[in-house]
Image (cartoon, helix red, strand yellow):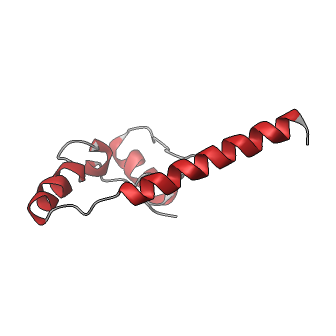
Amino acid sequence: MSYCQFLFTLTLTAGLSAVAVRAEERQAIAADQFDKLHKMIRVQPDEQRFWQIPWKLTITEAREQAAKEGKPIFVWAGAGGAPIGVC
């Protein structure tokens, strides 16, 4: 076994052990705290303002509106896709 393989095995073993220990430490959330915690982790008002923008889902719609209003088109694209969740 090479030194790199040994380090990988050691790291993997330590990581799996930590996961196993944490799994045992989990405790149920008390019913009276659940609502409070749920409100805290949900998206808050004005937290993601791009959801408030009336995005166009096709380039055709965007071009028509841009031509009508004399404005440029902003295209949001990337490997993760658009944040509005349209595939």
Q: Residue at x 66, y 48 (%)?
A: 13
**Residue farthest right in this picture:** 1
Q: Is residue 11 left or right of residue 7?
A: left
Residue lying farthest to the left in this orientation: 32
Question: Where is residue 71 drawn, in percent x and y?
Answer: 38, 38
Q: Nearer the viewer, residue 54 or 9?
A: 9
State left or right for residue 28 relative to residue 2: left
Q: Is residue 72 left or right of residue 48?
A: right
Residue 53 horizontal/vertical position (percent): 29, 48
Q: Is residue 57 above or below residue 17?
A: below
Of residue 70 and residue 45, the one placed in the foreground of this image is 45
* 32 on left or right of 84: left
Where the N terminus falls, by quadrant? top right
Q: Position of residue 86 (x, y in %)?
A: 46, 63
Q: Is residue 10 above or below residue 24?
A: above
Which residue does the image show at 32% across and 45% down from the upper left? 50
Task: Give the residue at x 36% y 53%.
Answer: 55
Q: Is residue 56 visible?
A: no
Label tally: 0
Closest to the observer, 86 or 58? 86
- Expressed as whole percent of the image width and height from the top left, the position of residue 6 reads 81, 40
| Residue 3 in sight in this render | yes
